[in-house]
Amino acid sequence: MIRKPAVSGAFYPDNPKTLETSIEKSFTNELAIGKIPKLNKSFNDKLTGIMVPHAGYIYSGPTASYGFYHLVENGFPDTFIILCPNHTGIGYDISVYDEGYWQTPLGKVEVDSDLASKFIKYSDYAVSDETAHLREHSIEVEIPFLQYFSDDFKIVPICIGTQNINTSYDIANAIKLTKEECSSSISLISSTDLTHFFPQDVTLINDEIVLNDINQMNSEKLLTDVYEHNITMCGYGAVASNIIYSADSGVETCEILNHSTSGDVSGDYSSVVGYASGIFMI
């Protein structure tokens, strides 16, 4: 079973060479971290996970570069567990793509079926389901950033259809129990954008609220603030799961590395989307 690209040629280039160039520019342009990292051959498990955006590379790639830079410099684990929101409405509370491969213009990445099956076993909500992933972009756009540096890793793609405190705790606990049973090293990637389609001034206010919650590792306040302030952050459940898992692993704060909006690229600040990168590190 091979999951074919759904948004290549739209969110990122479909030509391999052009895609590699686009990734390099995401690291080196004036809004980015400014340099391309070198992969650490030794995995440092002090970094439990990252938060990165998932828009088109021209818009969110520079902000994503901050998170991926630290991930690459700290070394790759055996398996990345990639958490994303469900934009299509297809699938279940927690839909796990649990076998086969994901294909991008840079090649195929194997799904860690053993780790995925154990995660499903320990979760009260997760099911094996490929349908939620077939048209979902928010995991797909992260994978080429990993493939640029290595082909020696596996993934467990998890699409969260019901984002609340119960599913966030369930995901974090299932990952913890899975890790205890498996010998594989893991890191989490939470794929999310922040405020959607508000003017720049409103976006900056709303984004500051959720980024403060994330920085302080307060998953419950994050979800409460999203609901009460009607903040249109799409992957709050994916980030909350990372907060809970990382806090249990000993992480005390999420370092917010960079924050931007689509207006910083387009120059149109009348209706923007917010992006941020952060790292969870012991």
Image (cartoon, grey):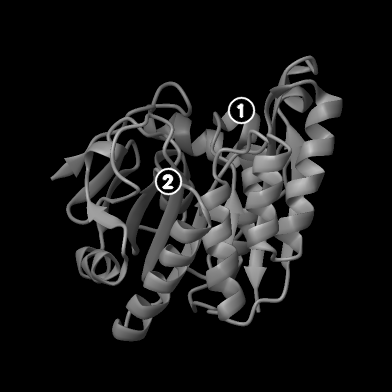
Label 2 is placed on what type of residue? Answer: Thr
Q: Is residue 63 above or below residue 49?
A: above
Residue found at the very far left of the displayed protein: 1
Q: Nearer the viewer, residue 107 or 189?
A: 189
Label 1 is placed on what type of residue? Answer: Ile
Provide residue 136's location: percent of width, then percent of height.
37, 34
Residue 211 seen: yes
Q: What numbered label is drawn on residue 58?
A: 1
Q: Residue at x 38, y 27 (%)?
A: 8
Q: What numbered label is drawn on residue 232?
A: none
Q: Nearer the viewer, residue 205 or 135?
A: 205
Residues under numbered marks 1 and 2 in contact, where contact means CB atoms less than 8 Å apart: no
Mark 2 secondary-structure assignment = loop
Q: Quadrant of residue 256?
A: bottom right
Placement of the C terminus among the 4 image quadrants:
bottom right
Q: Residue at x 60, y 54 (%)?
A: 51
Provide residue 186's location: percent of width, then percent of height.
42, 72
Left or right placement of residue 63 versus residue 81 in this view:
right
Left or right placement of residue 123 versus residue 63 in this view:
left
Q: What numbered label is drawn on residue 162?
A: 2
Placement of the N terminus among the 4 image quadrants:
top left
Left or right placement of residue 93 versus residue 34 in this view:
left
Q: Residue at x 64, y 60 (%)?
A: 220
Badge 1 density bin: few <14, some 14–19, many ≥20, Cα 10 Å: some
Q: Quadrant of residue 156?
A: bottom left
Q: Earlier in the sequence, mark 1 or mark 2?
A: 1
